[in-house]
Image (spheres, coloured by chain):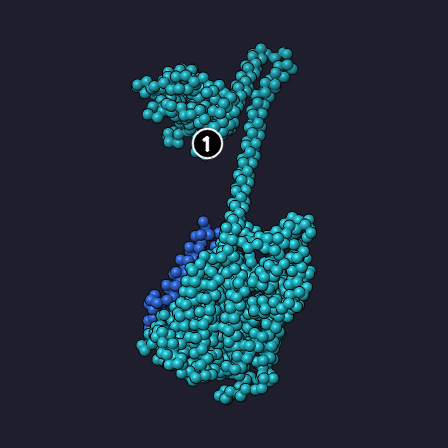
Chain colours: A cyan, B blue
Amino acid sequence: MLTPALVLGASSAYLLLLFAVAWWGDRRAQQGRSVVDNAWVYALSMAVYCTAWTYFGSVGRAASGGVWFLPIYLGPTLAMLLAWLVLRRMIRTARTHRITSIADFVASRYGKSPLLAGLVTLISVVGIVPYIALQLKAIASGYAVLTMPAGAPAAGASPWWRDGMLAVALALACFTMVFGTRRLDSTERHEGMVAAIAFESVVKLAAFVAVGVFVTWGLFDGPGALFARALAQPDLQALLALSQPERPFAYGQWFALTMLSMLSVLLLPRQFQVMVVENMREQHLRRAAWLFPAYLLAINLFVLPIALGGLMVLGRGADADTFVLSLPLAVGQPGLALAAFVGGLSAATGMVIVEAIAVSTMVSNDLVMPLLLRLPGLARRADLTGVLLAIRRAAIVLVLLLGYLYFHLAGEAYALVSIGLISFAAVAQFAPALLGGMYWKGGTREGALAGLLAGFALWAYTLMLPSIAKSGWWDSSFIEHGPWGVALLRPEQLLGLTGLDNLTHSLFWSLLANAGLFVGLSLLRTPSPRETSQALLFVDVLDRTQAAQPVFWRGRAQVADLQALAARFLGAAQAQRLFEDYARRSGAAGIGHIEPDARLVHFVETELAGAIGSASARVMVASVVEEEALDMDDVLRILDEASQLRAYSHALEQASAELRAANERLESLDRLKDDFMSSVTHELRTPLTSIRALAELMLAEPQMPQAQRQQFLGIVVAESERLSRLVNQVLDMAKIESGQAQWHDADVDLSALLRQAAQTVGELVHERGAELVLELPETPPPPLRADRDRLMQVLLNLLSNAAKFVPAGRGRIVLRLRTDAHGATVEVQDNGPGVPEHQRELVFEKFRQGGDAARRPQGTGLGLPISRQIVQHFGGRLELRPDCGQGACFAFTLPWTPPSEQTAPGAAAGDKP
Amino acid sequence: MRTRLLQQRLLGLFALALLLLNFPLLALWDRDVLVLGLPLFPAALFLLWALLIALLAWLMERTD
């Protein structure tokens, strides 16, 4: 047992710490060094899903039903598997339209309907207030366990002014007001609050795991020993199995619970707040999507050990809901029990704070504002920011006081124990309208309204009313026999449907009616232009960037009117800043130069939506501008224009990419030209230098012996020849490349040509001591249309190259001609050193000669490139055969019918016709 | 194209999870067997859960 002072002191210290963390988070945000802007904090803030109901209730559920606590956490895992598809869509939509609550989301989708927003808010409040009460009850009963001597009867209710829970509720209201509504922000982001929630998630996980580790290893010798002892007891053994003999596995209920929690994790107002509204970057979702389920797994790991440990140590009669506290206390660990209580406190306060912000935003934007704005006095006030904040704060206090009141009235009643799932079932009613609206363009306002109303009504009748009746508030005979004795209307066996537990039963009927009416009524008429435009914006939200969203508005507006309107709800300074920003972005010189077009109206409406909700923003904007109603054709036309704009910008992107590529290519060509020039210059300089050196020598020494003079003159002549050959080839190359070469095409007899080429190089081959073998087909090939001299040039080039490379004395060159249906192939094979594989393409580049520089025979380095160009001109290709054994084998194939004149680009461009 | 592949993989993983965590595949684990001293059914449930989370983490953290 702990003294009340100690427990109260620890709780107060914890709450103060929470204030400090939130204050620090806000401060860092103002300094621009956000602590919230990362995926880990985002994931931890999602863990606000784990409330006191998880913290205490999971153990209680496990103690009575074994693994049945798990579907509540497997459902969110399923939802997170699709987070990247569904949640990201919600985040993008909410950001694009400045949506700050789930009511706003639904209302905005169906043409910004105030009625729909109000209905969603109402359902949220009715569904969530008991849930808040449950958190307060958890704190209260935890406190009682810690401070009451074991076995003592629960103290009677103390008068309200001495009630600790009222103080807790007010402290939480205070926290929420300070960090939830300090200022009006059209994004409704609260970094300090998120930091505090993430901190609370760490605290509750650490505390729960600490208790689990203590029970598993401190009280028992590890999990093996714990389970072994539990399995020895038949009643505990039954808990660990899925199905028991007398109670077969209710897989329908298992599935229903999984689905229910899967929907709830997306639709609970507090989850929407932390996951969608407080999201800083979409990319955070990538990590949070798996971190959050991992957190859920971690916090559930020790639920079974604690439940079994509690049952074994404290016995069956003990209250399993407080095992987390009573177990450490019973075995003399008050410190651990206090830590566990702080963990439970963090789970409860985290939920209450976020839920209060989320619900109060809805209440003020979607219930109070639409009514207040009808008051003539208020509607004329120039600055409503103060009123707005006051309403928000009052709504927070109201929500928390309602929670407290419910807690106080329902007390220990049945209604409170099962309220967690009842709340889940209430918010699950948003699923058809919200999720359906995100993917289906045909949904209408009436469909959503009717579906929600029917679902809510059936939820209340089949789940909420029976649970209230069972807590003894009124006669529960209508559950047994039906109202007025009509058995078909029994709320837990509606229309005689039996065989389902009451939660599954209620879910089935409410969601059936809900989805059925939503789809059915939507199909009655085509959506109105306004509904269609919103549907287009919601369903295709991922296809467009924010700037490319179409604006469905037409009319006349004044910049001054719009700015005054913004100033009324956002404050003059904030409005001025927004308009200056807008002017800068739209390229206007100042606020006075802003074009009052549809985009500006849309901008102001969106900003206002962040502060007062989209339905009220719509009404307010409509009151200061003259707008024309759009018909369906207008909507489609605007959409078309936006798509065209998108297509244009896409085409523009493509064109600029092409331009960039062309530019890069030009640059690389330019570089190639430079390389070529420097190579040419280099090649010219070598013979020039040697000619000049020898000439200078002879000039300087008139007494030079005749023989030496002769030798020098011989070199000069040879070098000059080389020089003129080089110049000729460069010119030749340039002509061919630029397409200015002259081609004299005639019928060429290839056999004769080859024979002549062999004759021409015969002398050179003979000098090198090599032999030249001519292999011609037996039947003379048909004539080929080509330029005889050019082909000869190619042949001589290849043959002289071969002669240069064959080994002296035992060289062998084969000149071969083969023909087939397509064309003639000429091969020149030698038994020289060959060309290494990595140089096979290199030898065809200008000035790149094969072989290493030292042993390389003289040459210009242009012969092969020119030959290749010539062969290409006739539609063939000159290449090095890779598979010719020893030596090199150059081959080219010429087709019988030369392709059209433009085959080789560049080379043939200037060809004669 | 690649984002579309991610979407399909996530949908596939979702279908897998739905099958693994529900009747009848879940009932296959319901036996009186001990694995490393732990009863098979709860151990299998947690392991399947962890496996799904690991697969999701692998899909989401791949930088493509």
**Where A41 falls versus A686 (above or below)?**
below
Horizontal side, residue A156 vs residue A897: left or right = right
Q: Residue furthest left?
A: A778
Which residue is painted at 42% across and 60% down in the image? A524
Crowdedness near tag 1: few (<14), some (14–19) or many (≥20) residues, C-alpha within 10 Å = few
Q: Would residue A692 be seen by someone viewing this image from the given angle?
A: yes
Q: Is residue A750 left or right of residue A448?
A: left
In the depicted structure, whether residue A830 falls above or below residue A532 = above
Q: For the image shown, how many numbered marks are present on the structure?
A: 1
Quarter location, residue A466 = bottom left
Report x, y in % for residue A37: 58, 60
Closer to us: A671 or A585? A585
The residue located at (51%, 73%) in the rendering is: A126
Counting from the top left corner in percent of width and height, residue A290 is at 47, 62
Pick the front one: A31 or A126: A126
Chain assignment, label 1: A
Where residue A737 sits: x, y (%)?
51, 25
- Of A623 and A563, nearer the camera is A623
Which residue is labeled 1 in the image?
A841
Give the residue displayed 57% in from the left and 54% down from the top.
Answer: A628
Tag 1 secondary structure: loop
Q: Amino acid at mark 1?
A: Glu
Q: Position of residue A836 (x, y in %)?
A: 44, 32
**Residue at x-position 32% and y-position 78%:** A246
